Image (cartoon, rainbow, N blue to C red):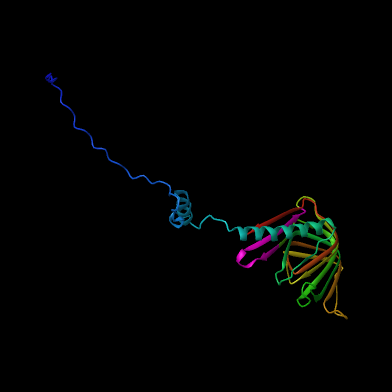
Amino acid sequence: MEKEHDTGMTREPEREETSLPIHLPPFEGESIDVSRVETIETRAVTDEEEELPPVGRTNRTVFWSVMLIAALVLFGMLGAVENGAIALAAAAPVPVTVQAKVLQAKNFHLYPGISPADNSTPVAVNQLDGTITDLVISKSISLGPLGTVTVKLEAGQNTPVTVTGLTNDATGLQADEGQFQNLVLNTGPNPFDQTATSATLTNLTISSPYQAVNSITLPGLTLSITHS
């Protein structure tokens, strides 16, 4: 028999093989409990939504409600301007604010009355023809929990606004100065009835629940809508 030759080399011990569990699909007749399956993507999205702070997030219902109301107000005012007349009536007791740097009026007529906006508010009715410099008409509409929408119409910054047959119901009037020509105060059938051939009011502010005009020219007209 041949003898084994010693080569001087040591043999490494054999490595033990470890087996890892392998999850195989269910065999025929077996089923998986789907209710216990949860993907990593689903958990990541859920965790991210829970961690998002409420700050900076937009409530879509509130946003589109405000946009719809603002658009309706805008289109209504544009339609009134295109028809040559503006009629702003407050369905609720929220007055329109009218501001002007200078109002130069002819055929001025002032008398007490009841506003057609609600048929109950006592007002001073102004009727006149004339020009208005730096006219601003603004109205704030409360939407309750949705906030407040403010509509503002501006015109006559460079060229004065021209009006014919303006009727303005005033619940309050303030001006730095008023000048009248041929002013007549009549306490006849309609008490406190005033007429003047011309009138000039500067830095005028009027609170009005209703105003209408037969014809109006609005140079430099701008409309803006803000939400707060």
Which residue is most to the bottom?
Answer: 189
* x and y percentages locating residue 220 in the rendered image: 77, 50
Quadrant placement of the C terminus:
bottom right
* x and y percentages locating residue 126 in the rendered image: 82, 69
Does the magenta segment cover residue 140?
Answer: yes
The part of the image, by quadrant, that contains residue 154 is: bottom right
On the rendered structure, is 95 left or right of 11? right
Does the magenta segment cover residue 6?
Answer: no
Q: Main secondary structure of the magenta part?
A: strand
* x and y percentages locating residue 50 in the rendered image: 46, 57
Q: Which is more toward the observer, 216 or 202?
A: 216
Note whether 217 is above or below 120 in the view shown.
above
Q: Which is more toward the observer, 77 or 214?
A: 77
On the rendered structure, is 149 left or right of 113? left
Note whether 6 is above or below 14 in the view shown.
above
Asked if residue 228 shows in the view, the reply is no
Total marks drawn? 0
Q: Which residues are magenta?
A: 139-156
x 82%, y 65%: residue: 212
The part of the image, by quadrant, that contains residue 5 is: top left
Q: Which is more toward the observer, 104 or 128?
A: 128
Note whether 53 is above or below 118 in the view shown.
above
Asked if residue 79 shows in the view, the reply is yes
Quadrant placement of the N terminus:
top left
* x and y percentages locating residue 224 in the rendered image: 70, 55
Note whether 40 is above or below 191 in the view shown.
above
